[in-house]
Image: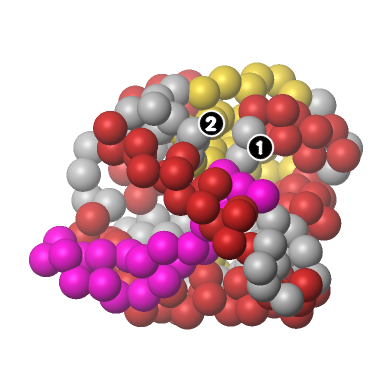
Amino acid sequence: MEKETADNLLKLVKSNYEKIAVDFDVSRKKPLWPEIVKLGAALGGGSKILDVGCGNGRLLAALPGKDIEYLGADNSLEMLTLARRNYPSHRFVQADLLDLSPISGHDFTHIFCLAVWQHIPSESLRIQALRELKNKLAVGGEVIISVWNMWSKTIRRKNYRFLILKTWLKSHWLRKEERLDFGDVIFSWKNSSGEELSERYYHAFTKRELRRLALAAGFKISELKKDEFNYWLILK
C-alpha cells in the first residue's frame, strides 16, 4: 500500500470516531463479550493496565472492584470526553496506537488493544503499532489484542466476506496510489435509526496473518484463538 493511501485511511478512521463518538458510546453500553469478562476476572491485584484505543472506557466494566492501576489512551478527544464522563475516577490520555510516546513508563503488566488494530492500514504500520505496544510492556507482561473475525460465517457478518472480495477486485481498477490491500474494507457506520453517519475502514485479518505479524514485531505468541465474532491474540 502507498504511504499516501495509508495516511488517508488513518485520517478517515480518526474522523469517523470523532463523528460517531456519542452514538458509539450508546452502542457499547451492552453486556461485555464473554472473553473480556474472563480476561478481566483473571487479572490479579496490583496489575498495571494500559488500555490502548480505550474508546468510552468500556474495559473498566470488566474490572469492578479490582485493585489495579489503569490508564486509558485514545486518539479521539470526543471519545476521551465520554470516557472521563463514564469513569471520572480513572485516568485517560490522548495518544495514538502508532505513537505512544505521550505515555510515560514501560512497565505495564497488561496492555489491552481491543477492536483497534483492525483500523491500522498497511503491513508496515501494523508492525509499527505492535512494536509501540511492546515498548510499553513490563518484563513478563502480556498484550491482549482482539480484532474482528470478519471471515466468520455467522449471520451477523456474512455480508463482510462478500464485501472483502468485492473491494479487492474493485481496487485493481484504481490508480496505484489509491489501491487497498487484500482484506481491506470501507463501509458506513449507521446509528440506531439506520442513518449513515460516517465511513470507516477495517482490515480483515486471517489467523496466519496475525501470527506472522506478531512474530515480525518480536513477540512470543502465548495464545491465538477465535470465536464467532473475534480473533484473540495474547502476546509476550
Residue closest to the eye, 90 or 19:
19
Where residue 6 sits in the image (x, y, percent)? Answer: 70, 70
* Three-letter residue code for mark 1: Val
User: How dense is the environment of label 2, judged by Cα within 10 Å: few (below 14), some, or many (20 and up)?
Assistant: many
Residue 71 on the magenta span:
no
**Magenta residues, dominant SS class:** strand
Question: In this view, which residue lies farthest toward the left?
Answer: 193
- Badge 1 or badge 2: first in the primary sequence: 1
The residue to which callout 2 is attached is: 231
Q: Secondary structure at mark 1?
A: strand
In the image: residue 157, left or right of residue 12: left
Colour scheme used in the picture? secondary structure
Range of magenta residues: 182-204
SS at mark 2?
A: strand
Tag 1 near tag 2, CB within 8 Å = no
Q: Is residue 20 visible?
A: yes
Q: Would you say 3 lies left or right of 47 here?
A: right
Question: Mark 1 — residue?
Answer: 143
Label 1 – label 2 distance at C-alpha: 14 Å
Above-or-below relation of 104 to 76: above
Quadrant housing the C terminus: top right
